[in-house]
Image (spheres, rainbow, N blue to C red):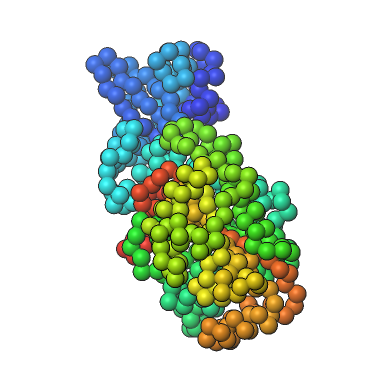
Amino acid sequence: MKRTLAHALPEATPGSRVLLQGWVHRRRELSAVTFLVVRDRTGLAQVVVRPGGADVPSEETTISVVGTATANPQAPGGIELTEPEITLLGEPADTPAVELWRPTLNTGLPTLLDHAATTWRHPARKATWELAAASLRGFRDTLDADGFTEVHSPKLVETATESGANVFTVDYFGRPAYLAQSPQFYKQQLVGVFERVYEVGPVFRAEPHDTVRHLAEYVSLDVELGFIEDHREVIACLRDTVAGMVDGIRRHAAPAVERLDLRLPDVPDELPVLHFREALAIAGAPADEPDLNPAHERALGEWALAEHGSDFVVVEGYPTANRAFYSHPDPADPHWSRAFDLIFRGIELVSGAQRLHRYSDYVAALEQRGYPYEPYASYVEAFRRGIPPHGGFAIGLERWVGRLVEATNIREVTLFPRDLHRLAP
């Protein structure tokens, strides 16, 4: 017999025999009848067990149920299964740490994370990652349609992409290597092959931060495009990409949006853009501040919503000395860079920039910052062989989803978070 999924059960012909497979979501034992709720990847279905009928296994046990489709207006979708034959597909499940049938999980974050393999089954919690998966579909669809090629770069690398203090060192056959902080060096080199590339993959940051917005490992959505005039082309690409991610959610995760009662952002045709100097003034920060802190970001998010009705605002023109050495300075005033951040609902979501693309500029930038040439040689040498003007950006997937659902801690929307304290499960 072919399996019927829970969402398709209302289409079953009354009186026909139907096969369901899933988990025991809830047992409601009454004096005259037991209601068994079965959960699969698409939703919930109701099974009615009369006295003397099938044994009802414990919650979260995986089962197979063959029963008769019976009309009942009070059942999900108006159809339930009666006269069931229940078969266990494994051993009876132990009692879970939380009651997954309750509408909300009223438990602390450590319990959610310690028992993640089970707590992610809760429909509302599961819905948050459905947003992530739909965002990824929208991300890929948008870039594929715009001539980009998906690539995958090494995660074991010979040198740090950014600060050497924030890398995880590993033993690579007797010599040191590092877990990649980003695919930055490789995606720039591959612009010299494909012109437009993107990557979805993990990145690793050995940052000693124990905050609600930092992880030691997260999923980065990286984009790089060649033959650009300046960073404004990169910002335009970013705008279209974020709009595509929102559209992906609307097309592929509408039930999750409804379950979580979300307000999805409207992405304006043009993102509001502020120079870093303007951003400092709006945030009430000193004019010589080298970067934006979380309080500044919140103030800018409030400003964008009040002035433009936008959940997004771009800050461009960060001081060149405080951005990565491969960031392109503004030709009109090299003190300022052609680097930018996208702030989404008061939190930095994206960093991007136009990059240097001339070999001589890289040599000069390394010398100016006092960086040795040798650790970057294999990267910098590529620019001796014709890399076009280019730029790109990176979006943190978990931070994106965290802001969508307004999570108080990024770990709430991370499948199996890694941080200062957690290496399991």
Relative image position of residue 378 (x, y in whole percent):
63, 80
The answer to whether any part of residue 282 appears in the image is yes
Compared to 37, does 95 lie above or below?
A: below
Relative image position of residue 76 (x, y in whole percent):
43, 21
Numbered-mark total: 0
Residue 152 figure quarter: bottom right
| Residue 122 as seen in the image, left or right of residue 227 | left
Compared to 261, does 359 lie above or below?
A: below
* 324, 340: nearer the viewer: 340
- The residue that appears at 75% across and 74% down in the rendered structure is 386
* 349, 9: nearer the viewer: 349
Residue found at the far left of this picture: 31
Compared to 217, does 157 lie above or below?
A: below
- The residue that appears at 61% across and 54% down in the rendered structure is 238
Relative image position of residue 32 (x, y in whole percent):
27, 14
Relative image position of residue 7 (x, y in whole percent):
50, 27
| Residue 266 as seen in the image, left or right of residue 229 | left
| Quadrant in the picture for the C terminus | bottom left
- The residue that appears at 66% across and 72% down in the rendered structure is 331
- The residue that appears at 34% across and 60% down in the rendered structure is 211
* 389, 160: nearer the viewer: 389
